[in-house]
Image (cartoon, helix red, strand yellow):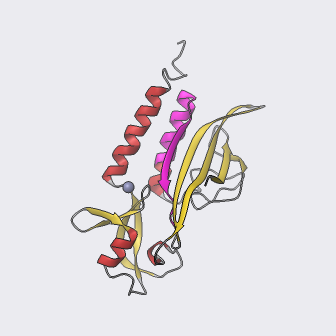
Amino acid sequence: MDRIDLRCVLDEKDVIIEASSPSSLCAAEVGGNFLQAISDLSLRELFRMIIARVRETGQSMIFSLRCDTAELKRLSYVRVGLHQTAAGSRVEVVNGTLQETKHRIRLTLLDDEVPRGPEILMICSWCKQVKLAGGRWVEVEEAMQELQLFEQRVLPRLSHGMCPTCAEAVRADMLRQVAASGTPRSRAGA
Ligand SMILES: [Zn+2]
């Protein structure tokens, strides 16, 4: 399976100049700022960094991430690269789905419509694992079982962040992809 959910082209100020329909990653609309359209602040910061690197090096970057919904387990990818237009090269962001399966049981914790109480749970923006007491990161289903959330009608709020495994993996991935691209373009020939 390889389905493109979202494709955006951004001008030099990250304003969307071309967009397909919005995806779960980003409520993108032409004329809006791409970064502002990403509600998850942790992901927004990462995209800010990735887009800056792509502009600097001219080299595409690809990352995989989980974009689960209450019903679906979804493995996605994001590719950020340069796209040539008549006005010059512009950043292009493509978000696609690689694999999609139904969860064994509906994960209401990922449903925005479910009422939320004062408690807060940290979820990793990248792998969608949830942080439990003691710093253990587990799958949403396991967290819901351990915290007995399947029986509750009001659920904790989710705060987005990054688990240490993903933080390290994304950092290493960026370094590797930048290294593979050689000299940053802005410095080449300087
Ligand atoms: Zn993670």
Q: Residue at x 46, y 75 (%)?
A: 104
- Image vertical order of residue 60 relative to residue 19, above or below: above
The residue nearer to you, when weighing 145 against 102, is 102
Q: Which residue does the image show at 39% across and 57% down from the upper left?
A: 161
Residue 80: where, in percent of width, then height?
58, 41
Which residue reaches farthest right? 86
Residue at image coords 35%, 69%: 121
Residue 160 belongs to the span the image colors magenta: no
Residue 34 as seen in the image, left or right of residue 108: right
**In which image quadrant can residue 174 be found?**
top left
The answer, for residue 120, to whether it is visible in the render is no
In which quadrant of the rendered image does the N terminus lie? bottom right
In the image: residue 18, left or right of residue 72 = right
Query: Is residue 66 on the magenta stretch?
Result: yes
Query: Could you say which is closer to the camera, residue 170 or residue 64?
Result: 64
Q: How many marks?
A: 0
Q: Is residue 140 visible?
A: yes
Image quarter for ligand 1 equals: bottom left
- In this rendered view, identify the residue nearer to me: 13 or 106: 106
Residue 179 in percent (x, y) is at 44, 27
The residue range painted magenta reads: 46-68
Residue at the outermost front position:
1
Counting from the top left corner in percent of width and height, residue 95 is at 60, 51
Residue 68, position in %: x, y?
Answer: 50, 64
In the picture as drawn, the residue positioned furthest to the left comes out as 134
